């Protein structure tokens, strides 16, 4: 996060950080699930 925000890290409120990290985690989890499902369907289709 330090690398991405740089000097603006001080502007990030703790509440925002928690909510944002949860949102990113949910989105990442969804993408991983979709990728795994696609990968599995390709493997079964062979």
Image (cartoon, helix red, strand yellow):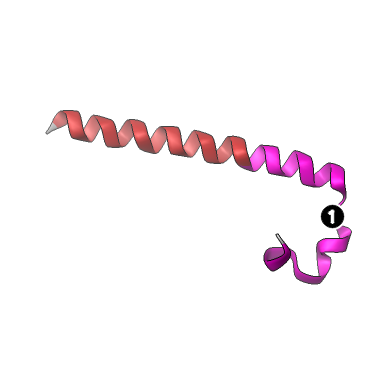
Majority secondary structure in the magenta region: helix
In the rendered image, the vertical position of residue 42 relative to residue 14, given as above or below: above
Horizontal and vertical percent position of residue 22 = 69, 37
For the residue pair 31 and 14, the one nearer the viewer reads as 14
- The answer to whether 39 is drawn above or below residue 13 in the figure is above
Name the element at disc 1: loop
* Count of numbered circles in the view: 1
What is the residue that sits farthest to the bottom in this orientation? 7
Q: Is residue 15 within the magenta segment?
A: yes
Mark 1, residues whose alpha carbon is within 10 Å: few (<14), some, or many (≥20)?
few
Query: Which residue is depicted at the point 87% across and 50% down?
Result: 13
Residue sitting at x 86%, y 47%: 14
Image coordinates of residue 15 in percent, x first then y, are: 85, 42
21 vs 38, nearest the viewer? 21
Q: Which residues lie in the magenta part?
A: 2-24
Please give left or right for residue 22 compared with residue 34 in the image.
right
Residue at the location (76% across, 39% down)?
A: 19
The quadrant of the image that shows the N terminus is bottom right
Q: Give residue 20's quadrant in the image.
A: top right
Quarter of the image that includes the C terminus:
top left
Give the vertical position of 23 relative to 13 (above or below).
above
The residue that disc 1 covers is: 12
**Residue 26 lies in quadrant:** top right
Residue 1 drawn above or below residue 19: below
Write the residue at 19% across / 34% down: 43
Percent coordinates x, y for residue 25 in the rendering: 61, 39
């Amino acid at each position: 996060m330090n690398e991405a925000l740089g000097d603006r890290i001080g502007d990030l409120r703790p509440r925002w950080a928690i909510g944002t990290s949860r949102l990113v985690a949910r989105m990442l989890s969804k993408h991983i699930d979709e990728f795994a499902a696609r990968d599995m369907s390709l493997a079964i289709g062979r």
